[in-house]
Image (tube, rainbow, N blue to C red):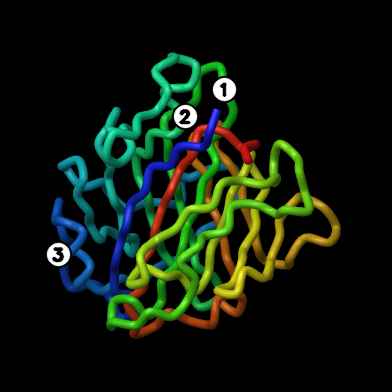
Amino acid sequence: MGKVLFILIITFALPAVCLAEEAEGYSVADVSKIPVAGHKITVDKSINDWVGELPPLDNSAVVSKGEFIFKDAASDDTGTGNYSYATNKALHKGSDLKEFRVTWDKDNLYLLIVCDRPGDWWAPYRLVGIDQDGAKGGRGGTQVLAQGDMDELSSDSGLFGELTVSPELACEYVIGISSTYKGRIWDASGKLIARRECETDDTPGFKIDDDNWRAVEVAIPLKLIGGSPEGQTWRFIVATGQQDYDR
């Protein structure tokens, strides 16, 4: 079965100022203008330190308690155009994105990706592209978002179909997350710059952990992705797939 991806494009500002007020249920375009002053997250199999409140409406965004939060509608994973996901109940739930959150502190960028918990299936593959210059009209970065290491044909980090985005969404960095704790980070040239396998040679500070197979949180050292986002506007391309092992 080929990999099918849900794609979400998110833009928001990351200046280092405190929020004067919080947004409730805005569109992504509107909430992207509200500054985010983030906070530390401990990646530890618990998502209790993600304290922001979800927006009241589906397919809307909010800045709450130092977190940018997008709430996705349930059961909308039909793909683009005529593309649709498998209808078998064992496969149906795993890729349906429920929410995506971002925050940061002086050391790390933190991500939270929540999907429906799979039925009789494995955790979905998750892919996040970071576009650091597109909001200002830049087209630097890669249009091809790597989804696996061609030298590692395993069910957790094998070769995947490549996802291509338009030039205005080209990404400076791409994060691939497989299983419940494994991941890779590639730069714009496709070079692997970080890996996470729970082994002694893991990239220091790059952390991934999962809460009950459905919610994965990620810590990425800012020094790996060009430094602090202070005063910048970054865009995130989020994709989820139904399985880890595809060509």
Q: Name which quarter of the figure residue 88 lies in.
A: top left
Rendering coords of residue 107 (x, y %): 56, 75
Disc 1 packing (10 Å; few <14; some 14–19; many ≥20): some
In the rendered structure, are the residues bearing label 3 and label 1 in contact, judged by CB atoms less than 8 Å apart? no
Mark 3 falls on what kind of element?
A: helix
Separation (CA) of disc 3 from disc 2 = 29 Å
The Cα–Cα distance between marks 3 and 1, rounded to whole angstroms, is 37 Å
Q: Quadrant of the N terminus?
A: top right
In-image side of 82 versus 127 (left or right): left
Type of amino acid under label 1 = Trp
In the foreground, 202 or 103: 202
Residue plotted at (39% across, 28% down): 85
Mark 2 in CB contact with mark 1 (< 8 angstroms): yes
Query: Is residue 63 visible to the viewer in this orientation of the structure?
Result: yes
Which label sits on residue 30?
3
Identify the residue position indicated by label 2 in the image. Answer: 94
Pick whichever of labels 3 and 1 is earlier in the sequence: 3
Residue 169 picture location, percent across and down: 36, 68
Badge 3 density bin: few <14, some 14–19, many ≥20, Cα 10 Å: some
User: For residue 222, which numbered disc appears in the image?
Assistant: none
Residue located 74% across and 65% down the image: 203
